[in-house]
Image (cartoon, rainbow, N blue to C red):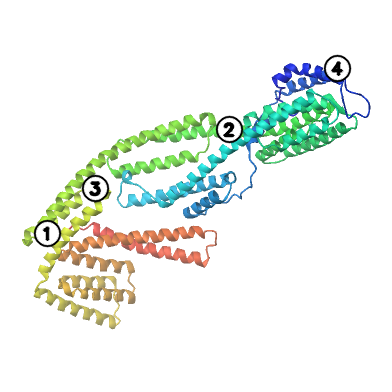
Amino acid sequence: MLDETEKLPEENEENLKNQKTENLDKADKVDTKPKEVVEIDSKPEVEKEVTEEIKVEKNTSSNKAIDEIENKIAESSEGSDHEEIEVVDYSKFTLEELVDQLTSLVKNQPVQSINENVNKIKKTFNSKFGALIKSEKEKFLAAGGNTIDFHYQNPIKTTYNSILYDFKIKRAEFFKNQENKLNENLDIKLEVIEQLKHLVDNAHGGDMYKNFKALQDRWRETGPIPRAKYNDTWRTYHHHVERFYDLLHMSNDLRELDFKHNLDEKLKLVEKAEELDKLEDINEAFKELQVLHKLWKEDIGPVAREHREKVWDQFSEATKKIHDKRHEHYKSLKSKFEGNIDKKLAVIAEIEALDTSKNNSRSDWQKSINEIEKLREKFFAVGQVPRAKSDEIWNKFKNATKKFNAAKNLFFKDLKKDYLENLNKKKALIEKAIALKDSEDWDSTTEVMKKIQSDWKKIGHVPRKYSDKLWKEFKDACNYYFDRLHNKQDEGNKEQVEILNKKKDLLSTIKNTIDNKVEIDLETLKDFVTNWRSLGRVPYEMRHIEMKFNKMLDKIASENKIDKEAVEMVKFENLVNSYLEQGDFRKLDSEQMFVRKKIDETNKEIQQLENNIGFISNVSDDNPLLKNVRNQIDSYKETLEIWVTKLNYLRQLEY
């Protein structure tokens, strides 16, 4: 028999003896002359053999290995024939390339052929897009944004979702059509069974064998049927096939030839099944074993009764070996998964133990958020747990993170109220600055404007969507007043003209020192700067002399052994101090914004170069391209260090 668990259909089991008695009655009427193609076996032998067959089926019903194989075959019975599409490694594709690939697959390939590639694209896209969101969020927070205000949109995600939706619609339509086709195939196979049953129940010679073969061909040509009906339908069909062979024999030895051919084919399957036990990949062996069982069931007919039990036992034994080997493999995995339970519970305990009660600022919460993110990554890195515990562990994890998120959201909700208060305070300062910007009471108004600027710095964050607009309004009002003040101060300042002449003389002295090849160290250079500043500031329209002085400093640095960074800072401090002396706070603010911008640009250049290294990491360290990129990174890092030093110097100023 083919299936250890198969039982005769109830109607067949209950009425089998009656059916066979009817056939035997008909057999009495069949002519037994040699010229007849078919004749009926005697009643005692038929009843005895059928009884033995039922006994064999009952004895094999406990074989769990065959049960599992039969269930797997039933699960795969709904599979549709389709051309296999090569599975691509999408790990190095960009987001845009992934969307292009997905679009091409959905539009140009059968939907039943692309599922594995679509799943790989989904996994890769989600991973890369998640990394992009994380990067954008880090930039947002680094720029002073708040986690609660972060929103990120990208057109590529919208396009991706649209194509994925088209795929799901096409897949749903395919499965709907497939379901109709499966049911149509089931009706055909049930009709074949009925015709086969009628053929056996109305046994007669003539075209009986030819009709039987035609029914077999029709059965094999009919496509897949619903998995829920597969085993019962096949068992019923196979029962009537064996009834046909058991009740009839061919005088021209066709039956014996058929039995011999089927026995040879089944022994080949037994041999192949035994060979599968040598495969190291147990899952591959199990998959191939399902193919062998399907061939045994659907492509190869019965064998002579005296061989049935023996050949089936051989096939069952080979099946059992692979089954037991597979179950040992999964038992080992289950043991490993059991160990993951405690690891995941330990991570959950860490999340629950995270104390947020002392978080009083956005930076405090940002630190806690980073800790939670690391614990989340740790949780997922542990791996799988047994299926029976999966939901329980996941719910505990969700509850732990939910508790954290509730506390976080409550804080940022209160913080939002503070932002609104800060918004109103800054609006009040803007109104005050606008009201004073045209004042000509220079002394008192200047002091008030300085205080307004100081108060502005003390006010905390405002909602991001208002931040830039408010700053522009405030800056424009302040700049307008101080530009007027500077213009007033620059008018007819004779003293400053004298300062200009003195600075020209100092420039001449420095130039002579350089031309005479006198060695100049850092302290001498600083003395030049000190002397320069002590002379005072020049008229606004004559500030080009400051540029000449800075160029002179660069020349000193290039022709003497003076640290580049030190010279750069001396020049910068000279520039900043000149702004302070002039009360040009607008320039100071602009300088600080410029330094911040250069820091951001330099960081981006470093990040881009480091990303480039990732694409050429498989080359040797002495590769010219790799060495060049690393030299560029080192150069940018040196530059970044200078910009950071400048920013720190600006921050410590009080103005």
Amino acid type, mark 1: Lys
Tag nearer the camera, 4 or 2: 4
Q: Quadrant of the C terminus?
A: bottom left
At 6% across and 62% down in the image, what residue appears?
440
Q: Can see residue 277?
A: no
Q: Secondary structure at mark 4?
A: helix
Please state, as top left, top right, bottom left or bottom right, where the N terminus lies in the image: top right
* Secondary structure beneath label 3: loop
Q: CA distance from mark 1 to mark 2?
A: 76 Å
Q: Is residue 315 left or right of residue 556?
A: right
Residue 552 vertical position relative to residue 450 in the rendered view, above or below: below
The CA distance from mark 3 to mark 4 is 99 Å
Q: Which residue is mark 1?
A: 437
Tell me where residue 475 appears, x and y as whole percent. 19, 58
Q: Which residue is mark 3?
A: 462
Relative placement, left or right, of 297 versus 86 is: right
Q: Residue furthest left?
A: 441
Is residue 9 among the parts visible in the rendering? Answer: yes
Give the image location of residue 576, x and y in percent. 22, 65
Q: Is residue 561 above or below residue 395?
A: below
Labels 4 and 1: the sequence-earlier one: 4
Earlier in the chain: of badge 1 and badge 2, it is 2
- Residue underneath mark 4: 44
Q: Evaluate if marks 4 and 2 touch, with contact meaning CB atoms under 8 Å apart.
A: no
Numbered disc total: 4
Residue indicated by mark 2: 334
Q: Horizontal placement of 614 versus 403: left or right?
A: right
